[in-house]
Image (cartoon, coloured by chain):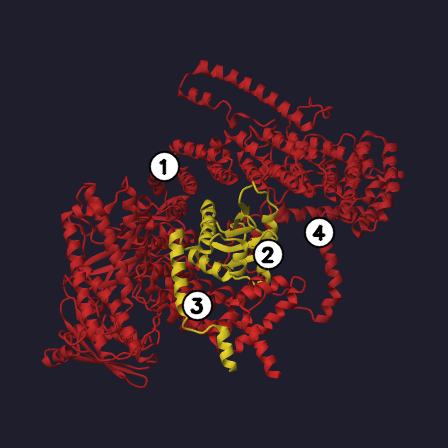
Amino acid sequence: MIKAILIFNNHGKPRLSKFYQRYSEDTQQQIIRETFHLVSKRDENVCNFLEGGLLIGGSDNKLIYRHYATLYFVFCVDSSESELGILDLIQVFVETLDKCFENVCELDLIFHVDKVHNILAEMVMGGMVLETNMNEIVTQIDAQNKLEKSETFIFQSPRQAGRQRLV
Amino acid sequence: MALKMVKGSIDRMFDKNLQDLVRGIRNHKEDEAKYISQCIDEIKQELKQDNIAVKANAVCKLTYLQMLGYDISWAAFNIIEVMSASKFTFKRIGYLAASQCFHEGTDVIMLTTNQIRKDLSSPNQYDTGVALTGLSCFVTPDLARDLANDIMTLMSHTKPYIRKKAVLIMYKVFLKYPESLRPAFPRLKEKLEDPDPGVQSAAVNVICELARRNPKNYLSLAPLFFKLMTSSTNNWVLIKIIKLFGALTPLEPRLGKKLIEPLTNLIHSTSAMSLLYECVNTVIAVLISLSSGMPNHSASIQLCVQKLRILIEDSDQNLKYLGLLAMSKILKTHPKSVQSHKDLILQCLDDKDESIRLRALDLLYGMVSKKNLMEIVKKLMIHVDKAEGTTYRDELLTKIIDICSQSNYQYITNFEWYISILVELTRLEGTRHGHLIAAQMLDVAIRVKAIRKFAVSQMAMLLDNAHLIASNTQRNGICEVLYAAAWICGEFSEHLEEANQTLEAMLRPKVTTLPGHIQAVYVQNMVKLYASILQQKEQAGEKEAAQEITQLMIERLPQFVQSADLEVQERASCILQLIKYIQKLQVKEVPVAEEVIALFAGELNPVAPKAQKKVPVPEGLDLDAWINEPPSDSESEDEKPKTIFHEEEQRHSRHRQPEIDEEELARRREARKQEQANNPFYIKSSPSPQKRYQDTPGVEHIPVVQIDLSVPLKVPGMPMSDQYVKLEEERRHKQKLEKDKKKKKQKKEKRGKHHRHNSLHTESEEDIAPAHHVDIITEEMPENALPSDEDDKDPNDPYKALDIDLDKPLADSEKLPVQRHRNVETLKSPDSEVPLVEKKSKKPKKKEKKHKDKERDKGKKKEKEKKVVEEEEEEEEKKGEDLDFWLSTAPPTAPTPQAQSEPGTGTAVVAESQEVKKEEREEQDEEEEDEGKKSSKHKKKKHKKEKEEKSKDKKKSKKKSHHSEEEPPVSVQNGTLEDEPLPPMSSYRLLAENPYIKMTYDIQGNLQNDSQVTVSVIFENKSTSFLKSMELNVLDSLNTKMLRPEGSSVHDGIPVPFQLPPGISNEAQFVFTLQSIVMAQKLKGTLSFIVKNDEGSTHEKLDFKLHFSCASYLITTPCYSDAFAKLLESGDLHMSSIKVDGISISFQHLLAKICFHHHFSVVERVDSCASMYSRSIQGHHVCLLVKKGENSVSIDGKCNDSTLLSNLLDEMKETLSKC
């Protein structure tokens, strides 16, 4: 099981947090901070596994992370996941983001965290890996975007709605 | 003007979408919190709007704020509103927000049930998908219960996209609602063979996750997974399956044997490191499970170790890390294969990555042997010196201590060396682990008697150099060793050579700067030292010297009396008084030494850490009962100081107030001895000689020690431990030479196969004898300690609820709660319309059966392929046997292609599928017809669904009839018309029970044979032993006989075709033939079995009485109202009736009970009156008219046979009177 997926930047600012276990908002922030603290002090050329932080579930858990430019992608998983498999999954995730956002950069994640969530939802569901095939994920995302677009022209944009009300 | 303001603010409000919010926050870096609270106010305004688009926008922003740590649970209701929007765009926003912030404590979550159900059945697959994704994050037990059935239906959705999501979410449903596991499992299992690889992978994922927690319940799936493993090319699936096998092999060693070959093939062939790594891991697990049985897998071990070495040598740190991790697993069972890579692992200690260094340290922990311990520790000591940063150095220190002390100092051959290592460690700068070193020193000195002399000399040295250790004030940690040093010198003062010097060292003024608890130990042990010096001097007749030492004490002790630490002060003043008294006696020339030393008589034995817990509570002692009535509040306050004092006294129970009165002293001594005799903690495990004050402090009672006194204690320029390493090497060399000599002698004497064996292991551990005879005193346990071992399993473990036996056939009561509509109550004849409602509970059962059949087929095919002797296939083959069978055949086979080549089974399959198709066509026709009739769209859908399920049932029952089972095709309306839930019912009744085994049974009539019934018996092993060679025998009656294999006599039992490991249950079936069925029958019988456990095996027997009720001869048969009426009119039925009073259950329950326990079906029901029908295996018609009054029920029955009828009614009366 995947317990949590975190994305934060080099300064520890969260860009996405997805917890598959219930934590209060305060605890979530604490976990993000602690994880950032653990991960950020590691050199570039050391291994990508960390024996679990203190906050997120006992000795069975591991942090598996990758560092891309300004962003850290951290998966907290238990022993039923393959370490190398998760590393591959992170790679797939980033590549999918790259495809969906066309040359993804931190700004995309900052302004479109909802889209990142939607992409993630096609890969991991409730803490379990749903799909690992990038093409399949992209197809589903595209189809959903299309569906969204087809809906937008039917309803009025919020701005118009507001104006209409005033008249 | 006002309008303008309003317009402006509203405009601004609507302008702000998520991007604007993010931008705004970035622009307000200084007053972010203020800005956000402003935004939240705006969002609150937006949520008040009616426009769903505005609301969705607001919720979207809230989701972002949630990530930043803001609690948004106040908007839960608005989130639900957005979830229920019709547009996918909004719905998705709503579900995302819900998945981020809903949890079991969210009170409005119960409002979502219907919305989610609606979305799940939405025609748009993405609505369904988004609902499933959201639900997976916030499913609660209530939601799981209510939606389990809907989700289960989705597992067979046409779109793989939905199927895979539905399959995955089932895991969450199981977790929250464990009752759903058994009914849903058959379908989940089907999904393992789904044509879509994504769905397959999801199913594998879920089952692996389930099996990881409770592996034994999933053993029977091993053949299926094996097939998947050999056929799948998806690395994700493979990894999961291989991981699962890793969890299963410890339970079934035979599985391991089967796995080795394909796994090694994969290791050789795969290019994916992740897969390779998991394969290696599982091979290791297999080898571990086999290690006891078969030593012949050295090739596989070598392969693993070799592959791991490649990983560890890789430049990729990740592979290095994992390699070390896996290596540590091999280490546990095959230490020798890993030890040869010691160089590599020691090299990893220099790695710049701390994770890798720590892993390597872990490995070293397991790699030590008697042979290499000294060498490894020496290397570690070098690392300690080099290590940067105190944390890593502390880690090294603890590891050194762990390594040396593991399993009761098993690997230490020379304790002198170990003590000197500990002493060396005290020189570490700024360690936090002083107490660890101290604890080791104490432990070794107490438990290794032979080392005491050496330890004392070393500790005396430490005390002498205490200023070095204590000088550096900020490294307080290390002073702890002085605590140990002082205690050891005091307690074992008889070994001290220069006691005077040590005593003086302890009395130095500098000591008062030490922490209080250490000073307290100093003070206490000074007296011990003093006592032994006194004795020495007195025996030597040096009265002067004795008085001198007393004087020294009296001079120096006052500095402790002034201590700020209460403990130190108290002890010091007591002791000072005692010594002043001694001085008085000395002046009078009274010999006092023996009396003084008597204060410290008796030996302190180490007590096992769990000893207290293991003291059994004596019978009749209630620990919770008050000894005295609880005092009132005011009193308890008064008593408080007293209790504190009392505790203090207990903590230092060894510290007794010195008494001046000699008589009192003697009395106390007696009392103490008495106490020790009675105290379970003082009962010695081995009768080691007790220290007595009458004994001369000679060497007699010190165990025989050959300490090599040629060892110089201080060698300049070389750390002491190294000296020992050198000496040890020499010693071993000498030993070896001696051995060789002996061996040569032996060679001359006898030349056998023995010799070769010896020469192979010349360097093996056994050959290294410890330097001196070491007796490690084992820790004491109380007398009659309970063997109950820890296993304190967490009762709150959520996975424990999922420990459910999945092989047991489904009981009728087990079904998923289904939402049902009220249905038309009367039924017409089959030609007019198919009954709409069915006994749904039957469904899962049949599915299970179907599976059994499938597997049986598989078994058959394999059997034929293998050209195994054509044994008549046993009629009742069970899954468990399938597994056994599968495990016993050697190479894996892919059954599908060969199946076609089998003419017999092949045609059967074809015929089956044709039939299924026909069914489907019929079904479709009916559906169209149906749809034409119904107008309400919703209703139509509902019916459709029901039909689908029903048709499946039909197909299954058709299929089943091929295999000539006893079940008739059932489509019965069984009174379960109302929404009211039925209480759980099981048709299995208790047959017999003893501490080993429990048997429950059920009898079913056989439609194909009018004189046979099948008795299904579930055997449940309740013990912790293995049950085997079970044999069931009954004493046949004239009427009823057990069907035995041909050629066996009436007295032969029938062997139960399986064995039972502890806690497992399994079902076996026995066929009985009977002549008359009009009367109930009872047969006496015996089950004999062998109980096998660690102590051996015993033969056990269990007697039982098998009760064949008349109802067990009935077969639930549907009957339509018109046929029923005709039957009643025919007039050739006998009639009888009963009346039962005091019925409190509802009519529906009552009918359900009759249906379930007596195998009837409801023909027609009007209000509180129902007609029912059943048929016996010999073709008797039984018709009932059940009427319910206020508190009573009357049953009128008609049947071809009056005896049968009256017996049946009697049985019914008994059932109903229990209600």
Q: Which residue is mark 1?
A: B269
Q: CA distance from mark 4 to mark 1?
A: 65 Å
Please identify, in this view, whether the residue under mark 4 or under mark 3 is nearer the observer. 3
Chain A is shown in which shade?
A: yellow
**Amino acid at circle 3:** Thr
Q: Which residue is mark 4?
A: B651
Q: Give the structural element (helix, strand or loop) at label 3.
A: helix
Chain at tag 4 = B
Q: Earlier in the sequence, mark 3 or mark 1?
A: 3
Q: Which residue is mark 3?
A: B89
Q: Which residue is mark 2?
A: A13
Q: CA distance from mark 3 to mark 1?
A: 47 Å
Q: Give the structural element (helix, strand or loop) at label 2.
A: loop
Please identify, in this view, whether the residue under mark 2 or under mark 3 is nearer the observer. 3
Disc 2 and disc 1 on one polypeptide chain = no
Q: CA distance from mark 4 to mark 2?
A: 51 Å
**Amino acid at circle 2:** Lys
Please identify, in this view, whether the residue under mark 2 or under mark 1 is nearer the observer. 2
From the viewer's perspective, is residue A33 above or below residue B922?
above
